[in-house]
Amino acid sequence: MKQYQLLIASLLCIIIVALAPTKSEANTTISANGIKVNNVKDTNQPQPFTNAPITLNGPAGEVTFYYELVADAKGKESKIVLNTENSELLIAPSSLSVSVDNKMVKSIAINGDKPVREMTIPLKGDALKEGIHAVTVKYYGVLKEGMCVKQGTSANWLTLNINSYYQLDGLVKKTDVTLGDYPANFVGTEEQPVYIVMPDKPSTNTLNSALQMTNFLSNQSGRKNAVQITRESKIKELNQNVVFIGVPSEFSNSNIKKLWQDANVKQTADALHLSIRTLKHGQQETSAMFVTANKATDLEDRIAILTNPQFSKQLSGLDLSVKDIPKQLNLTQNGSATLEQFGAENITLDSQSTNSAHYYYYVSPNTQLNKAFTLNLKLKKSESITSMKEQSELDNSTNIELIVNVNNIPHSVNLRTLADSKDGIYNVSVPIDAKAIKDNRLIDLQFQTTGLGVNDPCKETDEKRWIYIEKDSTFTLPIIQNVDEQKGITFAAFPYPFVSTEGMPIVVLPKKTDVLDEQLLKLYNAILQGVQQPTIQLKTAEQVTAKDAEKANVIFIGGPNEQPLLQKKVNDLIVSYKGNKAVLSDEGFVSETVQQFSWIQENPWSKGNHSILVIDHQGSTPYFMENKFLDEIINSDELATVAVQSSDKQFFTNAEYVKTNKQLNVDSENGKINNSISKWWIVGFAGLLLMIGLLIFRIKRRKNKKLR
């Protein structure tokens, strides 16, 4: 009997041990009570490739689309459907081909007899694996007049209609996420955004950290509203991965406080703490990242761990505490920038792909404007691009040219004149126009080619000319040597000088009025665009001091009525106030129609070494920074110091006033110089007369002595 009892007891122990969750599961999977989780997109429904028709021009054209799978798809109904319309003048061998991830999957013949058609491509194998996939549609068109005519006319075309789509079936469970998947797994889509969740009443340190992290992830996504900042009380449903950021004691929502408690994030003093947990609600799961510290100041001091790619790519595991702040590499102050820093990889252009994508980069704040600079290209070319001498001998008059567009200003490289290659690599220096860099320091770069294709329709050839541009090609930029060269800040230069790495810019919140998180985020995005080591100080009107302002570029949200520090310098502001209203008529505006306004000027605390930007409002609008007004300020290229938005959303600046005033100052200076020169001429002439008089007096005196 005892043997049976012992056996039953042993079996019960085995069952209990088997059913008990492991330590790993208990620590990493937590219940999301009160929050609905739905992190699997319904891809069984058709997903459109484009929201506008796309026309491919012949004789050859192509376009690439992308679709993303958050997990493997196992269903049998996954497919791509292309609805097209083409020219009625097409004949054989016109064709339409589709490849997925550079693997050709289907080609069909097209002609003018059937201009409207639907093409279905089943998706199989690797095309259904987790990740991002590329779908390339290639069009080849031949006109009805025959082969021996020029094919690149306006009559040679094919259009992909907006009812083209992809449909994916049978998504399986999402794979586990670790800190090593940051930031890739924390950038969403417009339909399924990632939320950065902070307390309803965050400290300025927590708010600043959340804004910087949201800005960084938004830039990684490259899609509007794919990453959104929000408060804890607004979270009711999660359709994507999520980030909770702040000190746990700052949170007040019962559901969120329970998540922090169950997440059991280990904390030590003077450190940033990161943890990945799986949130589960019913059968649905999503990944959550908890970002915290013992004190909000510790969180703010170390947020660069998550906003600087140098550090973020080193993260790993499920839990991590970072005490020491690593030294940041100085990447933007050495007077050069590689194409890789523009976001470009190695670029190949040929007879089919004659244009590169556009690449963007904000040059460092110490870059000298209005001075020429150089693009040092490292490139290879096909041997079929002959030299000028060979071109003459072969009686080939085709010119082959690389066009470098810098802010839409073209710069030419004759590929037939290249010489002295080393290991097949040509080093080419391209002088760039001094006017190419805009005041806001943005470079829009694109490469184009001409002459790589053979345009003789009667000459059949499989010859493929190409050029290859290496990503470590560099721009060499002029650097400011004298601080005086930085004078004259206007809205055309914004976000400069607030992106300067010489001291962190300060954003000062108003004393009485709350600013929407979305509007603050837009301001952060403007200040931090193109900055590789983004850091901002965020302070309230009560916290900021004159000593703070003396050493930094400062953005005040609210005028003297909301900012005590500005009130003390009201006589030094370029916009004056009468009571609660700004006197904007002095700058040429009708004050009664203005709702939002802003101005930029020298910092009155730092004796010309820094600048301030003030954003204020009046009238019926409750907002300091409506999105439209911010967009206008950010995108303005006018040499203005004051900008306003009227009650009917019209945008005006004092650019003409600044221009006229500047000319008056120049004329005044010239007048002073001329007056000074005139005075010296009078003094000199009087001196000359005096010398002549003395000389005559001495001569007469000598004559009188001799007579005596």
Image: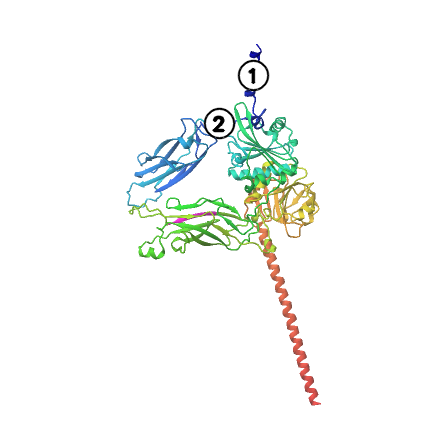
Type of amino acid at the residue the image marks with label 1: Ser
* Vertical arrangement, residue 490 with respect to residue 220, above or below: below
Q: Main secondary structure of the magenta part?
A: strand
Expressed as whole percent of the image width and height from the top left, the position of residue 181 reads 52, 35
Type of amino acid at the residue the image marks with label 2: Lys
Q: Residue at x 54, y 41 (%)?
A: 309
Q: Residue at x 42, y 31 (%)?
A: 128
Q: Residue furthest top?
A: 1
Q: Which mark is residue 173?
A: 2
Q: Which residues are magenta?
A: 445-450
Q: Mark 2 or 1 closer to N-term?
A: 1
Mark 1, secondary structure of its residue: helix
In the picture, the quarter occupied by the C terminus is bottom right
Q: Nearer the viewer, residue 693 or 415?
A: 415
The crowd level at tag 2 (other Cα within 10 Å; few <14, some 14-19, many 20+) is: few
Q: Which residue is mark 1?
A: 10
Q: Quadrant of residue 566?
A: top right
Expressed as whole percent of the image width and height from the top left, the position of residue 521 reads 58, 38
Mark 2, secondary structure of its residue: loop
Q: Residue at x 66, y 73 (%)?
A: 686
Expressed as whole percent of the image width and height from the top left, the position of residue 94 reads 32, 38
* Vertical arrangement, residue 551 with respect to residue 86, above or below: below
Expressed as whole percent of the image width and height from the top left, the position of residue 451 reads 37, 50
